[in-house]
Image (cartoon, rainbow, N blue to C red):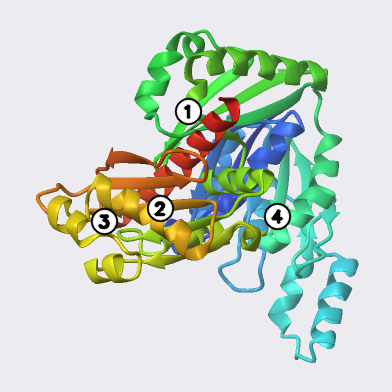
Amino acid sequence: MNAEIIAVGSELLLGQIVNTNARFISQHLAGAGINVYYHTVVGDNPDRLKSAIEIAEDRSDLIIFTGGLGPTKDDLTKETIAKHIGKELVFDENALESIEAYFKKTNRQMTENNRKQALVLEGSHVLANDHGMAPGMVVESKGHVYMLLPGPPKEMEPMFIEYGLTALSLQVKSNDKIVSRVLRFFGIGEAALETEIIDLIDSQSNPTIAPLAGDGEVTLRLTAKHQDHDMAIKMLDEIEQKISARVGQFLYGYNNTSLVEELSKVLKAKNVTIGAAESLTGGMFQQELTSVPGASSILKGGVVCYTNEVKHQVLKVKQETIDTYGVVSEQCALELAENVSSLVGADIGISFTGVAGPDEQEGKPVGTVYIGLSIKGQPGVVEKVILAGSREANRTRAVKFGCYYLLKHLKESQNA
């Protein structure tokens, strides 16, 4: 079964909200053995929606709609589909009772247009909405399966997991299971990574390899299809081994993890603490680290040392260092890392100093960043990176490079 997802809503086209529903549904359809080949977004217009449906019917067996099931005049998804496939809309008594109970519970007056949400396609399999009002539905007509889901993710996601997938399992005519694994890389560009594994990409069939770059990182989505789930996992393991043999030094994690999450895991596993001295990043490193639960066990604290005075007076960077080498320097970065670990009593000190932009500083071009690392029991090191991008992008990527280099040095010390 091949599927297409049609997201309905002018707010999506205007960029007012992001279409996270398509990603969520696609990820779960893969596990059900259903291929997703197209994502479509269409506004709240019945003629354009009808056109999108006709196009989808020419290329897909299953068409999943999100949005347009609400009570307002521009919520026209089920009305448009009903007219297109020649089905009547009828009231679902369970849905109507649920909507009435909701208004009674919240002590609000139910308006007549809210009854509209209880309308479903005649003969459809109704999907209960346990987190909202508008029910979903699945109906088959002339060789196509149509699934209608509400737009709000807090309603759509549990409905799809609890009821939608079960309904679709009855429609799937293949026993194949699709298993995916995402490999996450940092420190290598998309073009460079692709060059290293181009022969594997060119010869792919099953498993498939799909590169994707974004926000300074590169990911590879590996997807295998097999009737036996364990065999699909084995196929993924084999292709991952081939990839790792060539670019494994840049692989830092899997699936939905992040550099800061992986760093947090390693710090906790080693039972070590960290302190941060942040100049150009202005506290972003600590913000990222504290976004991960349990950060209090690893982060002792830090200093946003944006000015030379704070670097010298609070973090005790020698005035001679500042006068001789400047604050955007290897020497300053190292002293910042060493001194902040001592100041907060941490096992590790990390520092960020550099030129975020828009103007150069101390004769250093925009994007010049020094990351100092002071790890207890090891010589201090400084990593220099040259970034290209906006001021905010340089700050964000500097934090990622800090996580990456610290992870790298911690793993190297463990393997030494």
Amino acid on which the number 1 mark rests in the picture: Phe
**Mark 3, residue position:** 391
Mark 4 and mark 1 in contact (Cβ < 8 Å)? Answer: no
90 or 396: nearer the viewer: 396
Residue in the picture at 72% in, 82% down: 112
N-term-proximal mark, 2 vs 3 = 2
Mark 1 and mark 3 in contact (Cβ < 8 Å)? Answer: no
* Percent x, y of residue 248: 52, 22
The image quarter in which residue 26 lies: top right
Residue in the picture at 72% in, 62% down: 155
Residue in the picture at 49% in, 35% down: 409
**Mark 2, residue position:** 338
288 or 88: nearer the viewer: 288
Task: Report the number of discs.
Answer: 4
- Tell me: 95 left or right of 247: right
Alpha carbon distance from label 2 to label 4: 55 Å
Alpha carbon distance from label 3 to label 1: 25 Å
N-term-proximal mark, 3 vs 1 = 1
Amino acid on which the number 2 mark rests in the picture: Glu
Alpha carbon distance from label 2 to label 1: 27 Å
**Mark 4, residue position:** 149
**Mark 1, residue position:** 250
Alpha carbon distance from label 1 to label 4: 40 Å
Mark 1 and mark 2 in contact (Cβ < 8 Å)? Answer: no
State the mark number for residue 118.
none
Alpha carbon distance from label 4 to label 3: 41 Å
Alpha carbon distance from label 2 to label 3: 27 Å
Taking 91 as reference, is 414 above or below it?
A: above
